[in-house]
Amino acid sequence: MQPKLIIAFKDPGNPAFPTRAEGISKALTGNTHFPEPWPAPLPSSAQLAADVAAYQSAHIAARPGDKQKIALRDAARAVVTAELKRLALYLEMVADGDVAALMSTGYDLRHATVKASGANPDILPAAEDFRVSRGVLSGTITLHARKLAGAGAYEVQTTVADPTQEPGWVGGGVFTRCSKIELSGLAPGAVVSARLRGIGSHSPVAWPVVASLRVV
């Protein structure tokens, strides 16, 4: 089982969370293992730092127990928590089992557990019913797939070269949904191949499905 980042955070009033979030933010800023820009919809390191600072201020303001300020603290904390969870999925994917890279993120690492023999439950299966259609606007395509159990996000790559040659593939983004994923800015007339795989607490498969389409 590949090492994983711990993304379970405690209650909003936990005094350790502001420090922990700040530590992760600082560890990711300028981290050479995970160079920016990060794909949408992930926040930039600057955005994460700003949101963490806003949460820290709200956390301090809520200490006297004012209900309105507590609500503001909880809302600010929810923003940071969501960002940290989305980032963790991306960081695990990029690290691809590199413990040193994962340790550099500021997250805590989950201890490996022993699995029963038989089919490997730590590998996500291939996405089903993956297809590509032309978008409404020129230069766009739309990707569709059936929701994959165990996937918290979906990574997309595209190529205008031979899809059987790995060097031609480039990142198309990381998305929280697997249907109606729209890619834009493509050259009309080009034959674009796309592939999709799930990202979750289990290891992703190695790009099992590819679909191609001529862009209009």
Image (tube, rainbow, N blue to C red):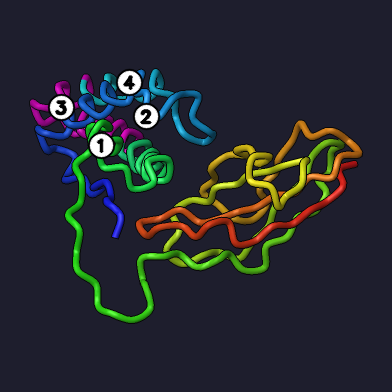
Q: Secondary structure at mark 1?
A: helix
Report x, y in % for residue 76: 30, 31
Report x, y in % for residue 59: 18, 27
Any magenta on residue 161?
Answer: no
Packing grade of label 2 (10 A; few <14, some 14-19, many >=20) is: some
Q: Amino acid at mark 4?
A: Ala
Q: Are marks 3 and 1 in contact (CB under 8 Å)?
A: no
The answer to which quarter of the image holds residue 58 is top left
Q: Are marks 4 and 3 in contact (CB under 8 Å)?
A: no
Q: Secondary structure at mark 2?
A: loop
Task: Tell me if 38 is positioned left or right of 13 in this view.
Answer: right
Q: Secondary structure at mark 4?
A: helix
Choose between 54 and 105: the one closer to the eye.
105
Report x, y in % for residue 121: 36, 71
Q: Which quadrant, please, contains the N terminus?
A: bottom left
Choose between 112 and 19: the one closer to the eye.
112
Q: Are marks 2 and 1 in contact (CB under 8 Å)?
A: yes
Residue at mark 3 to residue at mark 2: CA–CA distance = 22 Å
Q: Which residue is mark 3?
A: 19
Q: Amino acid at mark 1?
A: Ala
Q: Amino acid at mark 2?
A: His
Report x, y in % for residue 48: 36, 25
Q: Which residue is mark 1?
A: 100
- What main secondary structure does the magenta stretch of the protein show? helix
Q: Which residue is mark 2?
A: 33
Residue at mark 4 to residue at mark 3: CA–CA distance = 12 Å
Q: Which residue is mark 4?
A: 49
Going from N to C along the chain, the mark reached first, 2 or 1, is 2
Going from N to C along the chain, the mark reached first, 4 or 3, is 3
